[in-house]
Amino acid sequence: MTMLGPFPVAKALERLSARAPVLKLVGDAADLVTALNQQPRVSPAAYVTSAELGRAVKYTGPVAQQNCDVTLRVVLFVKNYAQQATGSGARHELDSLVIPQVRAALFGWAPNDVFDSLHFQAGRDEPYAAGWLVSQQVFGTNYRMSQQVMP
């Protein structure tokens, strides 16, 4: 199947909504900075963004082919009033409930047969502030674009 991208974030949102019931809000954002700046009204919440990076173009006769790496970022927000001063209540909820469900929903899944299955790349915490623990779960996949080159 020929695909020119981009990664279908809407399918990842559907998957998280269906398979990670602990999340009270699953949304998307225009970019990572926007996702990180959200102030959700409910907790736990997730905002999903993606980024793509193309590799070198290769030609097979009149067909141009390019592999593209995709980074899918799930920005998680957890507010927990237990031990709010240190954030340990939010940390416990994130580690014991939220992250396991997010990983179970996305790890090994692909939105269609064009993409390799998602694999875990990294977890990253943002500064704890105002009772909110914000953390990213980063997944990767890739796909190949191909198209006949027009003279």
Image (cartoon, grey):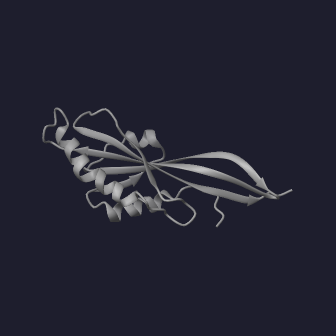
Q: Residue at x 63, y 46 (%)?
A: 54
Vertical position of residue 52 compared to residue 5: above or below: above
Residue nearest the observer in this picture, 26 or 89: 89
Q: Position of residue 144 (x, y in %)?
A: 63, 57
- Residue at the extreme left of the image, as rendered: 82
3 relative to 149 in the view: left or right? left
Q: Residue at x 34, y 59 (%)?
A: 104
Q: Residue at x 18, y 38 (%)?
A: 88
Label count reads 0
116 relative to 137 in the view: left or right? right
93 relative to 141 in the view: left or right? left
Residue nearest the observer in this picture, 26 or 137: 137
Q: Position of residue 74 (x, y in %)?
A: 39, 49
Q: Position of residue 118 (x, y in %)?
A: 46, 56
- Locate the N terminus and report the quarter of the image it occupies: bottom right
- Residue at the extreme right of the image, as rendered: 151
56 relative to 90 in the view: left or right? right
- Locate the C terminus and report the quarter of the image it occupies: bottom right
Q: Residue at x 23, y 34 (%)?
A: 130
Q: Position of residue 29 (x, y in %)?
A: 44, 48
